[in-house]
């Protein structure tokens, strides 16, 4: 019995070790462990528990109300005659399906409810990541396609009063595999105007699949269409079950059904390949029109470069049994010049349609973010009661140039800054990025989805040469730009694509409420006691370079080491470079005045600038040394171009954490060695009872 008791004790200890190991590995219902797309150990928590995906969020507008669940399924309602009327069979009868390898159903994922659900294989459902309302008129849902690392962000937005709403899908490949022949499909089981029978139509000019009801005086049309520039590859309208089957097969047949039936419809977009780090954006709209035998159908919203004339193609459709001529009226909500280049009237045959070109031109003094709603009204010349209208929205924006490439040489640490506003995409494991936290005096390494702030500098390191290509909105050069500081060392930069003389950059002091209490005064002014007048940058030959205005007194701790520095008389802050400044108290800002920006290198001032060779600048009161990199994480990377654009980011969790598995195996092996060690048991083996 002694051996048996010893055996029981050892077995209990082993079970305890196993339980602890499994607890460490983290078999938890709300947490998954694994390697992200960059090979970095992650714990990817689902931000919304699965139960919350059963609850819908809704946009309550007029005339549309839109419902959405956390697994991307949807429903839409419309106010008609004072009643909120369903337009889909249920809250969850509209959703999406994605294929990552042609029509191979092994690479298919979709929403988890309704017609387009994948009831046959629950593993094919999207994995919900987050579900939120950023504001009253927006619902954003993030899901993952299995363990592929592909993440789908669905953003529904509505402008109250419109007869349509917009959906943007961003399909981001955060995994390590390139997917060829990617297909995205969206649609559902319609219940147009509370009727379960509709007739299908397709308009090639609008790229719209749409429905009509038998009674034209009851409802107009209900249509689904791609945004301008987001051309639909295929469409389908038929019995809802046929549409669902086609969507789940990965290929729509480009047909519509011309009789009244229990209808559904869908659209399909295709992409040749989606490589790691790439994102695919798709924009679609769904709209309704008012009842009538005359229909005016507006095109999708569009964005134009500032100063251009926008041409919008409306459709005028005549459902009467006779030909009719319609007078056209065009109105700009901003009062801008409008025109109908093809004439102010149009003749439309019975049961037919005609395209009408409508134009609007913003004036020269229109603001940078100018926009307009363009409304076309058609009225019968023979019966003034036969009239209808529809509207589209046009936004005019400044042409946004792409940022120039910033080169990071192999095995090199470099201070970098940006003059565009944008959000970083995923970095591969060949590239590292850090920012400095003055409050805690530590470096913090980049996290996916981090916002880049013009006026701040960052450290970059690349194991292999790489070009950084920023894409985003450039910061104005015609306005004063304020950059907030924190007490301690700050990594700063030019906030826009202009040179600035450090001596002329201004300092502002605020109180705790943000009110200016001192300044602005130039950095070089004797009144400036808050920001050190010295400016440090990364030296050309290693270490840091140190610039000081003529009025600056060199600190005594540097005087004995002047021979270890070399003169560098450049007082300018230049775009895409990085600099260090020392700040002596809180609530301070730097102001980069528009009137002081320089378009070229400017005139050099006499200065005292020194560069340390071979020693840490921090030894003599200089900035912190650059962050440390221990060694390459992936020696197979070949550099290339890193394109930093706004993307939806997320980890791609797997079932196990490699570090946790390693520790688990180590525990088991250690326990086994101890278990079998000679003499440990002081007698017979524990599985053999004493004689």
Image (tube, rainbow, N blue to C red):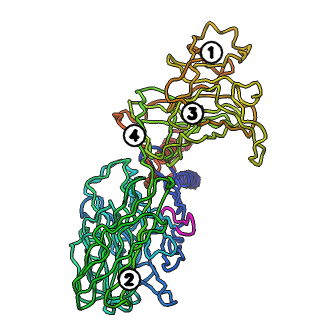
Number of the front mark, 3 or 1: 1
Q: Which mark is residue 493?
A: 3
The N terminus sits in image quarter? bottom right
Q: In this view, does 668 lie above or below 220?
A: above
Q: Dot 2, crowdedness within 10 Å: few (<14), some or many (≥20)?
A: many
Q: Write down the residue under mark 4.
A: 642
Q: How far apart are marks 4 and 1 (CA)?
A: 37 Å
Distance from disc 2 to disc 1, alpha carbons, whole Å, reads 73 Å
Residue 115 forms part of the magenta stretch: no
Mark 3–mark 1 Cα distance, whole angstroms, equals 20 Å
> Is the C-beta separation of discs 4 and 1 under 8 Å?
no
Neighbor class of circle 4 (other Cα within 10 Å; few <14, some 14-19, many 20+) is: some
Q: Which residue position holds label 2?
A: 388
Q: Which numbered dot is residue 607? A: 1
Q: Nearer the viewer, mark 2 or mark 1?
A: 2
| Residue 126 placement (x, y as % from top left) | 41, 65
**Element class at badge 1:** loop
Is 627 left, or right, of 156 in this rendering? right
* 2 vs 4, front mark: 2
Q: Earlier in the sequence, mark 2 or mark 3?
A: 2
SS class, disc 4: strand
For image coordinates 31% across by 68% down, the residue present is 357
Tell me where the magenta segment starts and ends, as one range.
Answer: 128-137
Sequence order check, earlier mark of 4 and 1: 1
User: Which sits earlier in the primary sequence, circle 2 or circle 4?
Assistant: 2
Quadrant of res 655: bottom left
Taking 527 as reference, is 478 above or below it?
below
The residue at 32%/59% (across/down) is: 229
């Amino acid at each position: 019995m002694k051996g048996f008791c010893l055996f029981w004790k050892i077995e209990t200890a082993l079970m305890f070790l196993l339980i602890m190991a499994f607890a460490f590995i983290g078999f938890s219902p709300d947490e998954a462990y694994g390697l992200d797309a960059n090979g970095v150990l992650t714990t990817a928590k689902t931000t919304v528990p699965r139960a919350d995906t059963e609850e819908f969020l809704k946009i309550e507008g007029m005339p549309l109300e839109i419902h959405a669940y956390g697994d991307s399924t949807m429903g839409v309602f419309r106010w008609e005659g004072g009643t909120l009327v369903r337009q889909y069979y249920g809250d969850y009868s509209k959703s999406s399906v994605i294929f990552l390898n042609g029509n191979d159903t092994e690479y298919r994922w979709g929403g988890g409810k309704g017609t387009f659900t994948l009831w046959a294989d629950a593993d094919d459902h999207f994995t919900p990541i987050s579900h939120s309302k950023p504001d009253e008129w927006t619902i954003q849902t993030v899901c993952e396609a299995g363990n592929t690392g592909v993440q789908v962000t669905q953003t529904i937005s509505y402008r109250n009063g419109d007869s349509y709403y917009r959906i943007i899908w961003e399909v981001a490949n955060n995994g390590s595999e390139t997917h060829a022949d990617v297909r995205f499909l969206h649609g559902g089981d319609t219940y147009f105007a509370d009727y379960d029978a509709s007739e299908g139509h397709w308009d090639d000019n609008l790229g719209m699949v749409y429905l009509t009801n038998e009674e034209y005086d009851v409802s107009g049309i209900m249509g689904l269409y791609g945004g301008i520039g987001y051309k639909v590859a295929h469409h389908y309208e038929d019995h809802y079950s046929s549409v669902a089957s086609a969507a789940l097969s990965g290929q729509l047949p480009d047909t519509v059904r011309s009789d009244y039936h229990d209808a559904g419809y869908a659209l399909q977009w295709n992409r040749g390949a989606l490589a790691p780090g790439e994102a695919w954006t798709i924009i679609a709209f769904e709209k309704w029109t008012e009842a009538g035998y005359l229909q005016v159908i507006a095109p999708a919203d569009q964005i134009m470069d500032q100063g251009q004339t926008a041409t919008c193609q409306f459709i005028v459709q005549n459902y009467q049994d006779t030909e009719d001529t319609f007078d056209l009226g065009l109105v700009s909500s901003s009062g801008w010049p409008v025109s109908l280049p093809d004439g102010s009237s149009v003749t439309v045959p019975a049961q037919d349609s005609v395209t009408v070109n409508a134009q609007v031109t913003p004036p020269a003094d229109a603001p940078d973010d100018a926009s307009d709603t363009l409304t076309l009204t058609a009225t019968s010349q023979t019966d003034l009661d036969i009239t209808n209208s529809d509207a589209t929205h046009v936004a005019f924006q400044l042409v946004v140039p792409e940022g120039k490439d910033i080169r990071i040489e192999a095995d090199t640490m470099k201070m970098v800054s940006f003059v565009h506003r944008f959000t970083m995409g995923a970095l591969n494991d060949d590239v590292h990025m850090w920012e400095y936290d003055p409050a805690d005096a530590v470096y913090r390494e980049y996290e996916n989805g981090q916002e880049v702030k013009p006026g701040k500098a960052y450290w970059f390191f690349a194991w292999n040469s790489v070009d950084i290509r920023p894409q985003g909105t450039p910061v104005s050069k015609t306005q004063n730009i304020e950059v907030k500081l924190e007490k301690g060392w700050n990594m700063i930069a030019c906030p826009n694509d202009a040179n600035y003389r450090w001596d002329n950059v201004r300092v502002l002091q605020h109180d705790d409420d943000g009110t200016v209490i001192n300044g602005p005064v130039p950095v070089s002014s004797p009144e400036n006691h808050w920001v050190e007048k010295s400016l440090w940058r990364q030296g050309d030959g290693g270490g840091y370079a140190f610039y000081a205005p003529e009025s600056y007194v060199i600190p005594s701790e540097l005087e004995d080491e002047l021979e270890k520095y070399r003169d560098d008389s450049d007082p300018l802050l230049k775009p895409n470079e990085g600099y260090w400044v020392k700040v002596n108290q809180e609530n301070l800002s730097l102001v980069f005045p528009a009137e002081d920006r320089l378009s070229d290198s400017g005139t050099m001032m006499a200065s005292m600038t020194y560069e340390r060779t071979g020693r840490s600048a921090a030894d003599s009161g200089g900035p912190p040394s650059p962050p440390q990199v221990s060694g390459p994480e992936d020696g197979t990377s070949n550099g290339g171009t890193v394109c930093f654009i706004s993307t939806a980011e997320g980890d791609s969790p797997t079932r196990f954490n490699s570090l946790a598995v390693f520790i688990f195996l180590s525990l088991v092996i250690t326990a086994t060695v101890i278990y079998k060690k000679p003499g440990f048991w002081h007698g017979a083996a524990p599985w053999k009872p004493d004689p």
